[in-house]
Image (cartoon, rainbow, N blue to C red):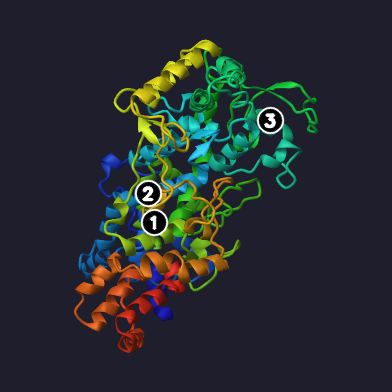
Amino acid sequence: MASNKLKIFSALAAAATLVPQMASAQLAPKAKDANYELNAAAQIDKLVANGFRSAKVTPPPVATDEEFLRRTYVTVAGRIPTYSEAVSFLDDQSSDKRSQLVQRLLDSDGYRSHMFNWWADLLRITDEFARTNGAPYKQWMKKAIADNKPYDKIVQELLNASGGGWEKDNGAVGYYVRDKGMPLDNMANTVRIFLGTRMECAQCHDHPSDTKIKQRDFYEIAAFTDGLRGVREDVGSKVGRDDEDKPREVRDLGRMLRYAVYDFSIQGGKKDKAMIKLPYDYKGRKGDPNEWIDGGTPSFFGKGISSRISSKTNAREKFANWVASPDNERFVKVIVNRLWKRTMGTGLFEPVDNLNSSTEPPNPQLLNYLAGLMKDVNFDMMAFQRILLNTKTYNLGPSREEASSSVPYHQAGRQLRRLSAEQIWDSLLALTVENPDQRKSANYGNAVYWRGKPVLVGKKSMNDVYKEVVALNSSDEFWNYTADLLKQIKADGGGGKGDMMMMGGGGNYGGLKRASELGSPMKPGHFLRQFGQSSREVIQGASTDSDVTQVLSILNGHVEREVVNNSGAVVYDNLGKAKSEAEKVNVLFLSTLSRKPTPDELQFMLAEVKANGQAGYRNVLAALLTTSEFIFVK
């Protein structure tokens, strides 16, 4: 066994020697090299092999087809493969079937669904915020994923967003509206998400552990986005004080309009200049309490910017371009590390959002190379992940050693990890329905919603409403407009009894659909929340901890009701097509664990079937769904 592992190790290192020698962060342009991604993958393998060698660690063996199949579906598409998908891959004798699978999944709706879950956790995307519906923000992000918009462009558009959320293709303003009224917290989140640095402590005092981060540093960078406000707040603020004497329905509709238009919008602060007042209890050096200071970026971020710029320059735009610049070393390395962790299971440095002056990545050559690669593919996240997924490193089997802060992934190997709440939900969906990736909620997009249903369809959209409302110049004009809009809605058949619904609906809080198509997040008590779905209150707040509610949900809750005892589930349709008892047991194993049973497992399960007949198959399925092999991925 040891000699086989050494052969794998040697092959991993030797494969990379076929790659032309290149600078650590340089690659030939894609257009000039048909083997560009293959060469990049081999270079990564070479650097990983160097890490194994320096740590004197023998790499694990290559993953079996069964391990690769399940891992790749879960990693890329966010669910286990269906029975037919598992059989198709395992029966395929093509030498390049693994790379074919990677490309097929990257092109799938499953990839887009799973990427949205990743982004939603990172940006804390919710269905409702600032007292209005957050649908445009969700739709903007889903479209950015579907279009494979480059990462740097996504970040630039989020940080420089202005205008109303219901303007066409302008949902990116949701990034600021999500934290409206909390500009300092929003900046702390921005720095943590995109620059991998935790500066929140410096709101109140110099950072206690990273001596380079001072309190003034935090306020200088916060100046770039301080003072943001809603569009036409001169009118919106008066509207909010003039609603008590209005008829009930007019008042209700007016409040919804106010939330959807004035609250769900952003425009710059002090003539778009970066200035901020230090807090009354400021303790730092270089400044006094309540003093106005100019914005600037801390020196520890490298080449920075200041707010002393041309009067024709928008300070926030300049800040957005600086954050998302390929010259911003932290920006590049943080997204590289996040995507490495998403693909490989563990970051090259951990935590992924605490890159500070004392961070020492165990394999800096690999991190530097990946940063260069990200820039070379122009921040194309799909291309970057495809390269990682086609490395021999990704193809290695699960590690036999436990990773730690001193022995990270590239030295200890892939770690066993529990599926996320969304991956578990979507994997159960693959056992329940045909074509699980097509299970989507209706996208109401730009429709005007009132009393739980769309109104004025084909006559007026939310984009139209936004434009009309921001053109109003007084509170009286607003309420006259609201009364007239209510008349139009009633004439169109709306305005009946029912719960009020925010304008521009779209969230779906039930049904057997992909997790990305359900509520963001789901309500407490739902299966997704029981299994650790983030509340979206903090950055990447999901949990994989276990508790008794999960056991109950598997034994006599959602899993028992929707899968095990659901005679209409697709897993039982596939079972009915099998001819023998052994074939049926194979169907259950391939459907749940993406592999066939061992001889011992097969005999044990056949004994259960012979003893209990048809009920025995349900017992086998229930048993497989309670195994750690189902709930974890190698």
Q: Is residue 192 visible to the viewer in this orientation of the structure?
A: yes
**Label 3 neighbourhood size at 10 Å, few (<14), some (14-19), many (20+)?**
many
Splitting the image into 4 quarters, where does residue 278 fall? Answer: top right
Q: Which residue is mark 2?
A: 113
**Label 1 neighbourhood size at 10 Å, few (<14), some (14-19), many (20+)?**
many
**In contact (CB < 8 Å): disc 2 and disc 1:** yes
In terms of sequence position, does the residue under pointer 2 or pointer 1 come before the other?
1
Q: Nearer the viewer, residue 263 or 336?
A: 263
Residue at 76% across, 38% down: 205
Compared with residue 167, is residue 533 higher up or lower down, i.e. above or below?
below
Q: Indicate the secondary structure of the residue bearing disc 2.
A: helix
Q: CA distance from mark 3 to mark 2?
A: 37 Å
Residue 78 numbered tag:
1
Q: Nearer the viewer, residue 224 or 438?
A: 438
Q: Which residue is mark 3?
A: 219
Report the amino acid beneath label 1: Gly
